[in-house]
Structure formats: C-alpha cells, structure tokens
Amino acid sequence: MNDRKESIKAALIQAFPIAISIAATGLSYGVLATQANLSLLEILGMSLLIFSGSVQFITVAMLSAGGSLLSILITTVLFNLRNILYGVALSKGLAPAKKWRWLLYGGISDEPYVLSSARFKKVGPDPLFFGVVIGTFYIALNSSVLIGALIGNQVDPQKWGLDLAFTVTFAALLMPNLPA
C-alpha cells in the first residue's frame, strides 16, 4: 500500500507543473476551435476521444483551411506515429497492469512518455504512476478545453499568449533534463 501511495504522490508532483501548461494548450484549443466555428459538442467530443493536442490543433487548422476529412486523418496519423515507438519503449513498465494495459496505451503521448520513462528507469515498472499522470493530464486538458470553448469568442489568443501554449509545454518537459 505504501508503494501505491508513493507512486500516486510522485505522479501528481511531477505531473502538476506540466498539467498547467497542458491546461493552457487546452484553453487555446478551445478558443481556436470556437473561432473556427466548431460546435461545443464537436470541440469537446474531439478532446474527450482524442488525447492529443497536436491532433486537435492540426484538425482545427486543416478544417479552417478547407481540408478534407481524409487528408486530416492521414496527416494526424502520420504526425503521431511516434506514439507507437513510445508504446514499445513503455511496454515493460506497463506490463504489470495486464488487463488495464490496453487502456493505458491510449494515454501515450509526449508528456506522459517523458515522465514515465524516467520513472521506469529509476524504480522499475510502475503502471499506476503512468495512469495517474495520464489521468492528471486528461482532466487538465479537457476541463480547460471546456473553459476555452465557452469563452472562445471573447478572447484574442495572441493577446493572451495562448498561441505559445504548445511551446511552453515542451519547454516544461525539457527543464528537468537540462544539466545544472
């Protein structure tokens, strides 16, 4: 039980700063998607079903430019092929989850990969850590998408710096790995 508490605590502590930048990304997506005339149902549906900020931004940009659904699908699949490699790299760390493993694989993206691969190297397999990380990010993303969608037509993304949200997320991922 103590290991479980430690996994949860470590996941929350490590995920929280990145969750803030993910929330900024979600807010930005909600605003931009509203301004691209997507409905609240479309915005939230995409966010709840597709756990990928890059896919959300690509889809909004391509829809705004008149892209077809087939071109959007091909582009987003190609853009996110790296997640297959992440899944392979994380497979030993997620193996103890057995029946939950396939659900956890749905949460693989850049941020959970970085945090979890470092954790797995340090303490060994820890699917609970990974699950808490993706849960934290999923809640941060989707709650901020809802807020962004609700205020979308009242906000200028560039004035508020929301156009930098993606960049800030990746900078937050790099910070712990920089030499002192």
Image: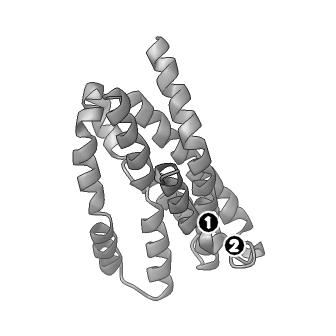
Residue 107, visible in the rendered structure? no
Residue 155 screen position, x and y as percent: 75, 74
22 horizontally vs 161: left or right: left
Residue 70 screen position, x and y as percent: 30, 77
Q: What is the quadrant of residue 71 in the picture?
A: bottom left
Residue 50, visible in the rendered structure? yes
Examine the rendered structure and indicate whether residue 132 appears above or below residue 16.
above
Query: Amino acid type of disc 1?
Result: Gly
Q: Residue at x 29, y 67 (%)?
A: 77
Residue on which the image places disc 2:
161
Q: What is the quadrant of residue 33 in the picture?
A: bottom right
Residue 149 screen position, x and y as percent: 66, 64
Query: Amino acid type of disc 2?
Result: Gly
Residue 37 screen position, x and y as percent: 60, 78
Query: Which of pointers 1 and 2 indicates the residue nearer the eye?
Result: 2
Please state the total of marks drawn on the protein image: 2
Q: Residue at x 55, y 56 (%)?
A: 172
44 horizontally vs 1: left or right: right
Residue on which the image places disc 1:
30
